[in-house]
Amino acid sequence: MVNTLFLPELKEMLAENNTFELQEFCTALHPARTAEFMEGLEAGEAWKVLRHADLKLREEIFGYFPREKQVEVIESQDRAEVAELIADLPADDRVDLLHDVKTEVVEELLPLLPAHERREILRLREYPEDSAGGMMTTEVAMVDEEVSVRQAIDDLTRAAERLETIYYIYAVDHDQRLDGVVTARQLLTALKKPEMRVADLMETDLIYVEATADRNEVTNQVAKYDLHAIPVVDERRRLLGIITHDDVIDAVRQEATEEAQMSAAVEPLEEGYMQTSIVTLWWKRGVWLTVLFVTAMFTATALHHYEDQLSRWKWLVIFIPLIMGSGGNTGNQSATLIITAMTTGNVRLRDWRAIAWRELRVGLMLGGLLGVLGLILSWIQTRHEEQALKHRLWPLVVPLTLVLVVTCGAVSGSLLPLVFKRFGLDPSLMSNPFVAAISDILAIVIYMTVALTLLSAA
Amino acid sequence: MVNTLFLPELKEMLAENNTFELQEFCTALHPARTAEFMEGLEAGEAWKVLRHADLKLREEIFGYFPREKQVEVIESQDRAEVAELIADLPADDRVDLLHDVKTEVVEELLPLLPAHERREILRLREYPEDSAGGMMTTEVAMVDEEVSVRQAIDDLTRAAERLETIYYIYAVDHDQRLDGVVTARQLLTALKKPEMRVADLMETDLIYVEATADRNEVTNQVAKYDLHAIPVVDERRRLLGIITHDDVIDAVRQEATEEAQMSAAVEPLEEGYMQTSIVTLWWKRGVWLTVLFVTAMFTATALHHYEDQLSRWKWLVIFIPLIMGSGGNTGNQSATLIITAMTTGNVRLRDWRAIAWRELRVGLMLGGLLGVLGLILSWIQTRHEEQALKHRLWPLVVPLTLVLVVTCGAVSGSLLPLVFKRFGLDPSLMSNPFVAAISDILAIVIYMTVALTLLSAA
């Protein structure tokens, strides 16, 4: 996956210490591409190349390095030079990055940073990485709501260099409390009346989040209101920072990956699959496989309990995986539908009655479908079994079981995520093992009860 | 979920036809909030309220209505008034919306639209909804690369009203071929030299997508390069439109939901869970449950084949669900890890050897873990079974089976998504049923083979 297209040339330039060509290389392309072409270099070599770019560009290219290389550069290169780079990184990325750097290195670097940046880092580090406070950047375009439009544009032009985005400009009062917002476009078109106060132009119906809000709330708000950026405030509505759309896109993608992994019973990976060590993979999967194994032990115990019946009617054994699978698959469908609907806000806790009623009906319909298939299948598989033919009602055992198991699977699969949510647990992580365990045991108990009832009656 | 806070007041205003208050209601809040408060109104009532907002605001509030209500309004209200609204909607949203409106209504509306908008709609309708062409808006800020900075700002200020975003301004040649990009900020700071040509200011290393590119490619590019918007070009690099970050966020979320549903064997829903009819839910789930059922039939056939052995050593039955479950869960973990890694570009087809080697090692380690648990469990469950105790090697059957089944599950689960990808099929949709089927049959065959070998040997 390493782009080696320019690697020989780059190494040659480094060997010759060809300043002109290295400068040219740094400036010619989009910083993301430049970073891509440097993937084959070691941390020390990459840093040597970067020193030929000015600070602003150096920071941009560095921002596109893979996380491990960033950490390696920071930990291995000259502290003073690294500190200069760190001081210039966007405040939100910087904090995330320093989370991954060895603590002793961070402690050596902090005193080398300007006092303002140091305070900023210490403040942002207090918020969890997946809270609004952890996602935000503190470099936000804000103006005093009392100044004129002309003054506001002047102020902003001076600040523009430093800011990640100037699409929205936030208007604050003397206490830095967030009162309104204007777009860059509104400000520009208002230049016809340059003496107008920002307070008279601004939109006051504001969408914002508190610093303690969790990642999912942020992404939902931004998606719902189609925002370019969302302001983050403290509990007294003072403006702390903004979360920009690129961080939201990253967050949505990360969330999706984590949810997919959790619902497949994998503890979310912190790095890419290929970058995760074998031992970490083993651990993050083994934990949940063990939980699932323990729940499957209950199924084994249930089966043990019915051992005599199963050896009396041994053709019943054939259909165990099929019946358990049908119940489990249906439960898994229901759980996933409810979890995705909760993530996008389509379903809430208080809808549980409506959900149970829907799943009861869908479950009966799905059970009916599989019941018909089960009738055909059990006839094909069992029509020559003498044991079975002795009982008049035998063809009904598998279909009837399927209707009941599938319906129970649908209802329990849909309600479990809501139960976990209700008790503050993560529905995606918790539901699957429990849906599997409950539907498996239900399947065995229902199957055996139906079989005993019908076959004893006949 | 309907917000009924202002519903009585709204209905009263409508009954009184209170123009002033209705106008006030439309303008006071963020359009998304206004739309929220109107959720309890019928299409006709909602349209009556909207007529009190000016066209621009009307269009914005309408844009936040749920899709069904939008369609209802369009199909039921006065064609000429509706056409006026449609002419003003952003080009990309408009086409998506018209996809859902009855064909005969669309055909009545098209002649009422200005010729330019009509052509636009017909052109955009040609792209599939989840291609770059289907996602883009044609309202894009572009300037001739030969004009001066001052001229460019003048041109843009005049166009600003109509445009969805002016964060990026695209520079094109006389043939509308995309040559470069400047940000609004660069243009503003360049005002120091107003006579400079746009061509001398613009960035020429461009990231763009072709109109035929699929949604996943678009989201990957935007996420990789942290773009606010990505330009869409035809095969001759002529600028057709842009895809803005809000559409990318929507696309990423939709993609995540669809992938989660697919991997739970649900055909993706087109609407929210609560809006989907019971029959549609039944159908979208029933199809895949049937496929899974058919694959489970093979497992039943395999079990049928071993019926005599199973009735000879009936304690073997107890562990069938546990062994099949462990293999299936491990395979599911591997498949999900590979699918999410492919979505984010962390893993490619050509990495298959490295992946198989990783999964072989992780699989052996996981199998070892579960094997130890299986040893303990089978000892607890079987220690009083006379049949088992007759054989010296019986305690090894379950652990050894688990090691083999889990390892096979890990390797096959990781390779199947790659195989499907290789043949142009959707890995998320196809993998799970097949992983389940393959690992189930493997589990039975391995279990029986191990049992026969060890128990006959002893």
Image (cartoon, coloured by chain):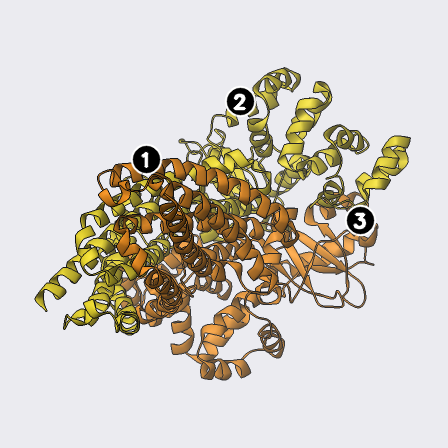
Chain colours: A orange, B yellow
Chain label for disc 3:
A
Foreground of the two, A83 or B422:
B422
**What amino acid type should be assigned to the residue bearing mark 2?**
Leu
User: Mark 3 highlights which residue?
Assistant: A201
Q: Nearer the viewer, mark 2 or mark 1?
A: 1
Q: What residue do we see at 36% from left, 68% from top?
A: A290
Quadrant where the C terminus of chain A sits is top left
Q: What residue do we see at 26% from left, 56% from top?
A: A311
Query: Marks 1/3: CA distance?
Result: 72 Å
- Occupied quadrant, residue B100: top right
Chain label for disc 2:
B
Q: Is residue A14 left or right of residue B61?
A: left
User: Can residue B131 be seen in this snapshot?
Assistant: no
Q: Nearer the viewer, mark 2 or mark 3?
A: 2
**What amino acid type should be assigned to the residue bearing mark 1?**
Ile
- Occupied quadrant, residue B17: top right
